[in-house]
Image (spheres, rainbow, N blue to C red):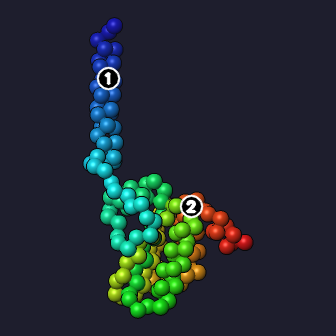
């Protein structure tokens, strides 16, 4: 073999080694620190998920709903009850976080299909938005559009 051909082959091997090292490092950083992420057993929570839990659930196709509302808001209780019902009939793909906070009621829905926030949401508009953002449309979603 000629010297030029040997240099080309050596360069290809060096690039392969650097490429594989870079890919390994990238995949390791995406995988996280390796510690176990605690996922709640319940789908209806009265606390906020941490950032690692949120990221983990979103990358696995779950839809996260965060509903914050003040105490003493009667319409908020109706919305909360409707969100709980939707969570229970959505084939296990929703995690609902119910948070009591002073101020305007706020609904934030996040999924692989995007995210949206509603201030002072009503039950029907919340239901429509959840349907739009769910990865897999459950039967109640499809039947409500007929």
Q: Residue furthest right?
A: 146
Q: Foreground residue, 75 or 135?
A: 75
x, y percentage for residue 129?
A: 55, 73
Q: CA distance from mark 2 to mark 1?
A: 49 Å
Q: Dot 2 corresponds to which residue?
A: 91
Q: Is residue 139 visible?
A: yes
x, y percentage for residue 41?
A: 42, 60
Please tell me how crowded label 1 is: few (under 14), some (14-19), or many (20+) other residues with Cα within 10 Å: few
Q: Dot 1 corresponds to which residue?
A: 13
Give SS at disc 1: helix
Q: Is residue 114 visible?
A: no
**Exactly how many numbered labels are in the figure?**
2
Q: Residue furthest front?
A: 41
Q: Of the numbered discs in the image, which one, if any, rests on residue 109?
A: none
Q: Closer to us: mark 2 or mark 1?
A: 2
The correct choice, above or below, for 111 with respect to 7 in the image is below
Q: Foreground residue, 126 or 89?
A: 89
The correct choice, above or below, for 23 with respect to 39 in the image is above
Residue pictured at 32% horizontal, 62% vertical: 51
Q: Which quadrant would the N terminus be assigned to in this image? A: top left
Residue 143 sits in quarter? bottom right
Residue 58 sits in quarter? bottom left
The correct choice, above or below, for 69 with respect to 92 in the image is below
């Amino acid at each position: 073999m000629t010297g030029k051909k040997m240099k080309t082959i050596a360069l290809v091997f060096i690039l392969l080694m650097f490429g594989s090292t870079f890919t390994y490092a990238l995949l390791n950083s995406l995988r996280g620190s390796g510690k176990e992420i605690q996922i709640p057993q319940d789908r209806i929570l009265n606390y906020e998920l941490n950032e690692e839990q949120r990221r983990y659930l979103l990358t696995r196709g779950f839809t996260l709903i965060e509903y914050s509302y003040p105490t003493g808001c009667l319409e908020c209780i109706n919305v909360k009850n409707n969100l709980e019902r939707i969570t229970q009939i959505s084939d296990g793909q929703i995690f609902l976080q119910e948070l009591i906070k002073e101020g305007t009621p706020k609904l934030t829905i996040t999924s692989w299909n995007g995210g949206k926030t509603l201030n002072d949401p009503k039950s029907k508009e919340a239901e429509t938005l959840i349907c739009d953002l769910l990865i897999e449309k459950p039967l109640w979603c499809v039947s409500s559009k007929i």
